[in-house]
Image (spheres, helix red, strand yellow):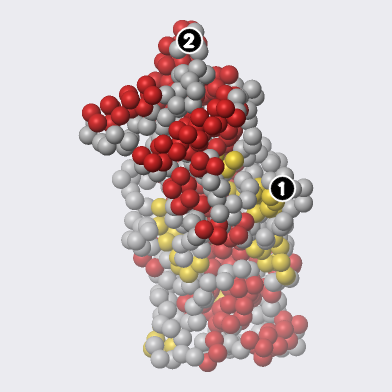
């Protein structure tokens, strides 16, 4: 897997790095293998009776069978086993490749005899260096690496021709137990094993005392890519989103170019660590996730939990369906703006109840339990007022709100009842972040993607290109720009002040769900969109945390690092020219609020046409069905 700059950042599955020979590998690696596995390799005739006898004694002394455990095999015998004694893999035989390899490794007495005969024949047919070459290219060396070139690239990010004595010792140490001694599993254990091998190399004259001392003092370290193991949450997501026959069920060597920016990935990880270290109690089990993407949906960084150097773990950025709270409100106002409403139109924030057929009376409340009277739409969003959001949603029609949200990529089941406006629906962080990217890019849908290009090793022509990007327009560009202006006020004047960036315009929205089980902050600059979620995996309520608190601070820390060195650019926002002409009192669900002009205005014409198509209305649910009883979602 390659990052946005074309550099390898992760591997998956078994990898063969290419053919090496006894002449092309580092002499240190060749000597480490000999010192570790078969110091008489260049003098015996394929088998070592002395080695076999010694292994049998050790096995019996340790309470095992004579052929269980230590085998006393020469490199030639191990090569014969790797070649399965010349028996090729035949898929028609009914064995999988794994079963075939397991059968080849069986240690019965009869197979040992056949192995010795095959080894003697190999010694007649091939030179010692040719046998060593076969061995080096076929040995399994942990973490999916087949052959020493693959292992060297995987663990150290360099060719097997370039490894140092310390690195050569670590690679040779994998031969006895590849998984146990893989440095990606336990670096300290791998370094201790390598230290023993450095001693053997010195003892057998392959290293001088000074060289051995240097190797002992400076043990091999993993490359940055190896430290990331399998690429973490981002690589998991790309592998799961790509075609299965090229990412998971293939024996081909596949190269995947991705959108990952490792500088931005590091920024997101550092921001999360900083906030949890400085502002969260040490024993807290709360989790968090971060997604950073461009306005076209190209994912640049992804953190799926507090443990960042993982593979195959639960990814809270892509797999956790959580209620969105007021992070959903921009799509309510996007619908209103698309119908011609102005950010400066007004709605009455007051005690409000409505009767839901089949469920009874529902009375939402604001987070502060206070009411502000007549407020503009921008102030309602800025201060995350719940009652105005519900009124606007009911006025424009829930079905239309759902259509707009779905157009922006929120594909999860959206609530049927009026609590839709307050984020009673569930979504994933990547889905919500992609939806906000659609607002930034001027109102077009976005499909988040990480895979840019997939090709087979050695081929010049890619098999497939990017699996996402900008799609169809959802709302007018003017409506999107006015919404960005409203969301900028959230950060500069409203509930998102803690997210404010120095000398850079930013827009966003907080979100907190019922009983603070989920806290969100999603927002963007002219350059990047970022989403943050925080909560407990078991839905335990957060203590003293809302979207305007720690999530906003994580977002701030992430974006400060992400934009380091980038010149400030203005947001593509448009301030309204002024409120539209007020409707006649009692004209609709606004309770006398400002509207979109006279009954013959373009906004009302579009409104009526869309209502005919999608249905919806003052207090009805979608398609005439009785709406579900919504949760009284409050938010800040």
Mark 2 nearby-residue class (10 Å; few <14, some 14–19, many ≥20): few
In the rendered view, tell whether residue 404 sits above or below residue 132: below
Can you name the residue that lies furthest to the top here? Answer: 209
Q: What number is the disc on residue 281?
A: none
| Secondary structure category for the residue under label 2 | loop
Mark 1 and mark 2 lie on one chain; the one further toward the N terminus is 2
Secondary structure category for the residue under label 1: loop
Mark sitting on residue 205: 2
In this orientation, which residue lies closer to the viewer: 158 or 623?
A: 158
Q: Is residue 304 left or right of residue 572?
A: left
Residue drawn at point x = 59 percent, y = 21 percent: 26
Percent coordinates x, y for residue 127 in the rendering: 60, 24
Residue found 29% across the figure and 34% down from its top: 66
Dot 1 corresponds to which residue? 569
Q: Closer to the camera, 229 or 618?
A: 229
At which x and y percent is residue 604?
70, 85
Which residue does the image show at 49% across and 26% down from the upper left?
Answer: 46
Looking at the rendering, which quadrant does residue 195 occupy?
top left
Query: Is residue 80 shown left or right of residue 573?
Result: left
Question: Label 1 vs label 2: CA separation?
Answer: 63 Å
Q: Nearer the viewer, residue 593 or 265?
A: 265
> Do residues under tags 1 and 2 come within 8 Å of each other at their CB atoms?
no
Where in the figure is residue 312, as x and y percent of width and height? 46, 52
Whether 487 is drawn above or below 300: the answer is below
Circle count: 2
Q: Position of residue 132 (x, y in %)?
A: 56, 27
Label 1: few (<14), some (14–19) or many (≥20) C-alpha neighbours in 10 Å = few
Of 139 and 44, nearer the camera is 44
Residue at x 42%, y 66% (from the top left corner): 513
């Amino acid at each position: 897997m390659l990052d946005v700059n074309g550099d390898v950042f992760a591997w998956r599955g078994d990898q063969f790095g290419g053919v090496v020979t006894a002449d092309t590998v580092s002499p240190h690696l060749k000597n480490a293998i000999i010192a570790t596995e078969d110091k008489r390799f260049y003098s015996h005739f394929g088998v070592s009776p002395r080695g076999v006898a010694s292994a049998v004694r050790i096995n019996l002394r340790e309470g095992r069978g004579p052929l269980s455990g230590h085998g006393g095999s020469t490199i030639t015998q191990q090569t014969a086993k790797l070649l399965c004694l010349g028996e090729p893999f035949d898929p028609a035989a009914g064995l999988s490749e794994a079963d075939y390899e397991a059968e080849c490794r069986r240690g019965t007495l009869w197979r040992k005899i056949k192995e010795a005969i095959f080894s003697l024949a190999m010694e007649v047919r091939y030179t010692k260096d040719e046998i060593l070459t076969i061995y080096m290219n076929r040995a399994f060396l942990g973490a999916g690496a087949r052959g020493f070139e693959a292992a060297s690239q995987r663990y150290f990010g360099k060719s097997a021709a370039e490894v140092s004595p310390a690195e050569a010792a670590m690679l040779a140490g994998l031969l006895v137990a590849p998984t146990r001694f893989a440095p990606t599993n336990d670096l300290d254990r791998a370094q201790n094993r390598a230290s023993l091998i450095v001693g053997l190399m010195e003892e057998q004259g392959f290293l001088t005392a000074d060289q051995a001392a240097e190797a002992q003092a400076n043990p091999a370290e993993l490359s940055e890519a190896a430290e990331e193991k399998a690429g973490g949450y981002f690589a998991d997501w790309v592998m799961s989103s790509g075609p299965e026959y090229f990412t998971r069920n293939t024996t081909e060597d596949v190269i995947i170019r991705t959108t990952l920016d490792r500088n931005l990935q590091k920024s997101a990880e550092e921001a999360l660590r900083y906030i949890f270290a400085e502002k969260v109690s040490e024993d807290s089990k709360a989790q968090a996730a971060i997604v950073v993407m461009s306005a076209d949906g190209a994912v640049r960084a992804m953190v799926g939990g507090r443990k960042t150097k993982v593979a195959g773990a639960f990814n809270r950025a892509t797999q956790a369906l959580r209620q969105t709270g007021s992070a959903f409100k921009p799509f309510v106002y996007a619908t209103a703006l698309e119908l011609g409403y102005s950010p400066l139109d007004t709605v009455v924030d007051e005690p409000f109840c409505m009767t839901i057929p089949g469920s009874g009376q529902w009375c939402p409340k604001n987070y502060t339990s206070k009411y502000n009277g007549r407020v503009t739409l921008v102030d309602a969003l800025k201060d995350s007022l719940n009652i105005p959001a519900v009124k606007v949603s009911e006025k424009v029609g829930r079905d239309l709100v759902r259509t707009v949200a779905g157009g922006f990529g929120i594909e999860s089941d959206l609530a049927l009842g009026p609590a839709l406006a307050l984020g009673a629906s569930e979504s994933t962080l990547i889905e919500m972040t992609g939806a906000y990217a659609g607002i930034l890019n001027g109102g077009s849908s976005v499909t988040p993607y990480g895979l840019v290009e997939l090709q087979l090793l050695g081929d010049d022509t890619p098999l497939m290109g990017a699996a996402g990007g900008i799609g169809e327009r959802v709302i007018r560009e003017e409506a999107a720009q006015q919404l960005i202006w409203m969301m900028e006020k959230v950060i500069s004047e409203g509930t998102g002040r803690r997210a404010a960036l120095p000398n850079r315009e930013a827009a966003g929205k907080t979100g907190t769900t019922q009983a603070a089980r989920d806290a969100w902050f999603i927002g963007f600059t002219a350059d990047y969109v970022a989403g943050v979620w925080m909560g407990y995996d078991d839905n335990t309520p957060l203590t003293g945390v809302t979207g305007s608190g720690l999530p906003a601070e994580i977002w701030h820390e992430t974006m400060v690092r992400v934009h380091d060195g980038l010149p400030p650019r203005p947001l593509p926002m448009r301030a309204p020219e002024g409120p539209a002409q007020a409707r006649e009192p009692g004209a609709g669900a606004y309770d006398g609020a400002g509207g979109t002009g006279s009954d013959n205005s373009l906004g009302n014409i579009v409104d009526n046409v869309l209502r005919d198509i999608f249905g919806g209305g003052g207090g009805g649910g979608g398609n005439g069905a009785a709406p579900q009883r919504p949760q009284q979602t409050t938010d800040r």
